[in-house]
Every structure is written in C-alpha cells, then in structure tokens.
Amino acid sequence: MSKQQRVWVSRPLFPEVLATLAQHVDLCVETKESKRTPEQLHAKLADVDGAIVGLSDRIDAAAIAGHHRLRAVANLGVGYNNLDLAALTAAGIIATNTPDVLTQTTADYAWALLLAAARRVSSAERWLRAGRWRGGMRFDDWLGVDVHGKTLGILGMGRIGQAVARRASGFDMRVIYHNRSRLPEAVERDCRATWVDKTALLQQADHLVLVLPYGAQSHHAIGAAELDMMKRTAVLVNIARGGIVDDAALAVALRDGRLAAAGLDVFEGEPAVNPALRELDNAVLSPHIASASADTRRAMAQLAADNLLAALGFGPQAGHPPS
Ligand code: DGY
C-alpha cells in the first residue's frame, strides 16, 4: 500500500524505531550524520510532511521557506536551541523535543565529568598510557580536589539539575542552586538544595555544574568576570550548551590556575573545540555524549518518532511540544 506522507530523518537511527515509522510513512533516512549547510537543509526539507532532526540541524525561517507541505519537526534532544520556534509557529509547523527520557542518564554523566575533572582521571590515564609511570606511587603527585563533603553549585535547576542535586547526598555535599525562579519548598527539600543568587553561587561552589537552557539570556553566562568570582580550587562542569560558557575565557582561567579544572561535554561552535582548551591537561573534554547510553538514546529516538507520528495524525496524542 503506498503511504501518503513522507518523512526525512537527518541521521541513522535504531532499526526498530525506523520500523515503527515505516509502518505509517515513506522514509528517507540519511546514512550518516553531518553538519549540513542551510541550502542543503532547505533542499532536504522540500516535499516532506515531517522531519526528525538533531542539534546540528538548524531549522529556521530559511530552512523551511516555501515548504508548505512540512507540518512537523521532531528534535532528538531535550534542548531545542537549533529550532527557531517563532519561525516554525508562524508557518504552522509543530515542533517537539524529548524531555524526561534522558534526565537520569544526563545527570549521571554530569557526575562522571565532575569526578573525572576533580580527580584528574583523564590526564592520569593519558600519562599512564604514554608509558610514563616508572616509579611507585608518588605521594605528592596527581593531587586532585575532593568532591565529598564539599559544596555543589548548580546553575539551572530544571529536571536534569534536580537529578544532579539528588545524587549529591551520597557524597555528603551541601547543594546550592541558582535558577530564574525558585523551586517549590517541597522540591528544594527533596533535592536538599538551597536557592542563592548567582554571585553567591559562583563564590561558594566548590564544584559548579551548568544545566541551563541556551538562549540570548544565557549566552556567556559564564565569562571572564564570572570565572574570576569562583574559587581557585573550583571545578566547572558544562553539560548544557557550549555558548553558555565563554570558552576562550575559560581556557585562560584554567591555564592561569584561576580555576582547578573543568569537565566539558559541549562547546561553542561544536564540533569545533577551542584549540586552547585542547591543550590543557586540567580540562576533561567529551563530544556531547551526556545522554549517550544505549537505553537512553533508543528511548530518545523512539520518543521523537512517536512525537512525529502523533503530530502527523497517527498517534493518540498530539506530539510532545518543547518543555
Ligand atoms: C539534549 O538532549 O539537549 C542533548 O544535549 C542532546 O542534544
């Protein structure tokens, strides 16, 4: 039976997820993930009813210009700063994202980066692999900073921030957070977290985790001035979006010992990474993998597919609008 609706998938996805889609729509699936030019994206979105896209696909007014057939765009991710919601709404196109399913896995990864940066795991491993471990255990070498018993600061206290906070009780930490709006008291109690203003957060945190959405207001929320306010022994972790940190200023602070270490999963202009950061032994760097466990990536793909099908009229609900 010929299917009426056509869907473009911008990268390879799990076969079982594609099979769900293929029951209802004609599929065009890219065999590799790549950063496309605006012209290429515009061409891919021609003559399709829906699309499944990811962070590297910038879907704005130019990408959808003249595409009257396009009715829904499902984003593979909870963050959706790659989508121009105003342009999509004006064109009557439904946009969806994948909240909740990645919350715990992403919070786990924030801790992986925090611990690796604080305890110098990556640089010690590089040193060992290079065959440089000759003597026994040098007592005054490889000294990191403690995590247990310290103050954890969280900037951005949505679902993932709260999940990061909950894990801190296993480390006997004091948790402080800053968010535009304060959480209800019951949630604060559950997370054992106390609201403070941004200056207090920067000054008091021994470990600061960034979990806020990216937008004009959060662009370079952590720049030279903010880094200067932090403790010299502090560790900064960014699992949110690259543009939230001024990477050039961070590289200078790490190089000059004005900050102990950083764990970074996201970068300004990724996949490019500021070369100054790549030089630093006290920066743990990873390629935007905070949600990358097999179970979670499968759940994200399935949710994006379900959202798209619902938005195109095949599901029981009307898709999952960004939240
Ligand atoms: C998200 O879900 O926002 C992750 O960062 C992947 O884009």
Image (spheres, rainbow, N blue to C red):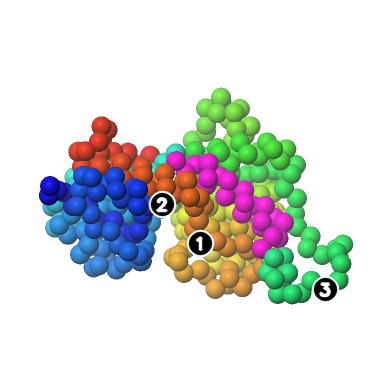
Q: Is residue 228 toward the left or the right of residue 32 in the image?
A: right
Secondary-structure class at tag 3: loop
Q: Nearer the N terminus, badge 2 or badge 3? A: 3
Q: Which residue is mark 2?
A: 215
User: Separation of disc 2 and disc 3 at Cα?
Assistant: 49 Å
Q: State whether residue 122 is above or below residue 298.
A: below
Q: In percent of the image, x 27 and y 33: which residue is there?
A: 317
Query: Could you tell me the amino acid type at mark 1?
Result: Pro
Q: Nearer the N terminus, badge 1 or badge 2? A: 2
Picture quadrant where residue 323 is located: top left
Q: Which residue is mark 3?
A: 134
Secondary-structure class at tag 2: loop
Asked whether residue 111 is in view, the answer is: yes
Q: Which residues are magenta?
A: 101-122
Q: Which residue is mark 1?
A: 287
Query: Magenta region, mostly helix, strand or loop?
Result: helix
Q: In percent of the image, x 63 and y 32: which residue is there?
A: 192
| Label 2 Cα neighbours within 10 Å, binned few <14 / some 14-19 / many ≥20 | few
| Label 1 Cα neighbours within 10 Å, binned few <14 / some 14-19 / many ≥20 | few
